[in-house]
Structures are given as C-alpha cells and as structure tokens.
Image (cartoon, helix red, strand yellow):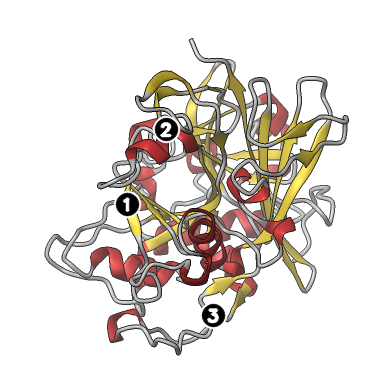
Amino acid sequence: MKTWLNVPADHDFSIYNLPFGIYSMEGVAPRAGIAIGDYVVDLQRCQNMGMFSDLLAPTMNVFKRKTLNRFIRKGKEITSGVRKIIQDELCKEDSFLRDETLSLLTPRDQVKMHLPVRVGDYTDFYSSREHATNVGAMFRDPDNALLPNWLHIPVGYHGRASSIIPSGKSIRRPQGQTMPKDAEQPVFGPSKRLDFELEVACVIGKNSKLGTSVSTEDAEDYIFGLVLFNDWSARDIQKWEYVPLGPFLGKNFASSISPWIVPLEALEHLKVGGYDQKDPEPLPYLKYEGDKNYDIELEVAIKTEDGSETTISRSNYKHLYWTMVQQLAHHTVNGCNLRVGDMLASGTISAPDESGYGSMLELSWAGSKEIPLSNGETRKFIEDGDTVIMRGFGNKDGKRVGFGEVRTKVLPSK
C-alpha cells in the first residue's frame, strides 16, 4: 500500500498500522481518532461526511465519546471495517481526507491523548520464563528458581484498574511499610526501590458470559488490540507485604500505558512460534495450534532531568513462555467473564540475555550492580525526576507497525 500522506518508512504509525485512540484539543472535546504518521484522523467528522454509512447509522454515536468502549463493543466487523475504509481513503488520490477545509486530519503535536478505554478490570500475568527464573534465583533457590506450578499454569493476579494512566501523566513515589535489612520492626516512608516492568497488555474487545470459558482457538476473537504497559512496582513494599496473598500496595499505585491501541489484525504479519512446551506438556485447554507469539521489539530508556536519555534494556514480545491466547483461556477456564475494555498484561518480558532484562530488579540484580547512564550517573532503581520511556515496534517485509511510546516521570512523594 502507498499513501499520499508523507509518512517516513521507519514511522511507527504507518499505513499498515492505523491504531485507535482518544484525543482532544482546544475547542474539541475528547473523541476517537486513528493515527497515521504525524496526524490524527477525526473519526467523528469522517462519519459526518458519510464515510461509514455502510457500517454505522448516521445517528450512531460511537466516536464522540471519552472512551472507545462503545465502538469496540460493536465487534470486529465494524471496527475492522472502519479501519479498512480509512486505510483505503489514505491511498486514494481523490480522498475527502485531502481536503484541508474539512479538517479531517490534525497534527498529532496539537492534540492531547487520553486513556483509550474505560478499564473495568485488569489482570497481570507472570509469563516470561526468563523473568520468573531470574526472580526465583535472586530470592529463592537458584537451582530450583521456578515454583512447581509455573510450567503448568499462566500465573497471574488481579490488579487495580483505577490507577491505570496514559503516557505523559506523572506519578508520585509511593509510600508504605518496608522491612529494612536486619531490622526487627517495619518502618513507614517513601519506597527506596521504585521499579518498572516492561510489559504488553491486550485490550478485551468482546464480552464473555459468566460461567463459560474461552478456548485458545477462539481467544483472538476476544482481543481488540495491544498497548505497551509499564507495571510500576515498589520492590521494598512488595517484598514485605506479598506473603501470603501476593502483590498489593507495591503494585496498585500506578500502571502506565501507551495511548494508541494497535489492532490485532495490524500485527498478523509479525506472528512467530512460541516456546517448546513439551516438558511438561500443558493440559489440553492450554494447548493451541499455529503461531501465537509476536516479533515485537521492545526497549526501555531512562531520561534524567538534565535531558540525557539512555536505553537500558532491549527485549522482544516473543520471549513470553505463556502466549496471550493461553493467558486468556486460563483466565476464563473457571467461568470468569471478560468485559470490553478489560486489560490483560503480559507480565515482565525479559530476554535471555541480561541486556534485555525487563526490570531494574533484574538489571541491577536486586541492587547489587549499578546501571551506567550516558551522563555519567548510575542507577540501581528509579530515582525522583527520572522519566521512564518504553517503545515497541515490529517490522517485516517493509511493513512497520509500532506502538509509539509510554513515558512517565517520577515525582517525589508528598
């Protein structure tokens, strides 16, 4: 495909991508848009022009809203149809989109991005074998790093949906109880081991019924698209609280996501095979056929207050042992229902090599090593004033599809 719009070949938001998001600007209330290059397509105005008349009634108000939930709920026949129409228009020389008087295209640097969906529920998995092995080796037995259940089930926990925030929104360093080394009593104060976790989350695009399960074969029908996901973690708070019920205050203070949802169909050409799950074999409900992982390059950078930026990790989505379809099948196997807008995060995605570890906990090996930055400073964990930036993209056969970025600055505790 070739678009008449000037989009560089290495741009995340290529003609092959066209992700959905919610944006606003001066004089324009939040509404749905599609990103193409350095522009946003106003889907509400496109509908007013009759561009989607074969898919949506003129009175069907799904775009002039603060979230994409109602639009996504219409199903993939509608959402994919809208995307295809915009894709065709961006390749037509006589397209309405080229008429500047209609104001259908707006430069992205003039808009403010919002949380793209209303997140009803959020689940975080623990599906990278490398990450789980690293954590187990640090805090348990290096020779038996994985717990007995890990190779049999996609381990996960339910997180806090209310504290999921879009890229660009700062967070404050969390406070809580910690147990200092060799102390006899816990103390209260700001976390001294603030960390990120490099993840990708899927956005649920179809409701499932309570009491029923979704198979690995049907799982993709329930996934609208993917976003980058930073699962912020206060390691010292987490360490003190997690026994016996797992993560709580060490995790629920914030999770940051990229604002553009990349539709699953835009990633189809990036599919790759998964891990060899033969020793042990998963139970029948977790087995699947075909390629279900994705070759998506991921990276994490730290930007300090002096403006310098250092890439500290390079990983890939394909380093997930438990695939997205297995996570969804396991999530629903007991009859738990999913709703449009729910998010399922992958868990930290660590590469086999330490240059691709997906958290400061692993990169600094629990604070025993210093990570050098380009300005001469070092880090063991994230400090006040640091901005953590995550990026991701895939590129195959000249078809680049990216997520943009999710960036979050850390402010001091109040």
**Outermost residue, left side:** 211
Q: Considering only order in the chain, which callout, 3 or 2, is on the residue closer to the N terminus?
A: 2
For the residue marked with disc 1, what is the amino acid? Tyr
User: Disc 2 to disc 1, how far (Cα)?
Assistant: 17 Å
Q: Residue at x 29, y 86 (%)?
A: 284
Q: Can residue 74 be seen in this snapshot?
A: no
Which residue matches tag 3? 275
Dot 2 alpha-carbon crowd within 10 angstroms: few under 14, some 14 to 19, many 20 or more: many
Q: Nearer the viewer, mark 2 or mark 1?
A: 2
Q: Label for residue 237?
A: 2
On screen, residue 406 above or below 319: above
Q: Considering only order in the chain, which callout, 1 or 2, is on the residue closer to the N terminus?
A: 1
**Outermost residue, top side:** 414
Dot 3 alpha-carbon crowd within 10 angstroms: few under 14, some 14 to 19, many 20 or more: few
* Residue 14 screen position, x and y as percent: 72, 55
Foreground pick, 412 / 371: 371
Q: Can residue 200 be seen in this snapshot?
A: yes
In the image, 121: left or right of 87? left
Foreground pick, 47 / 339: 339
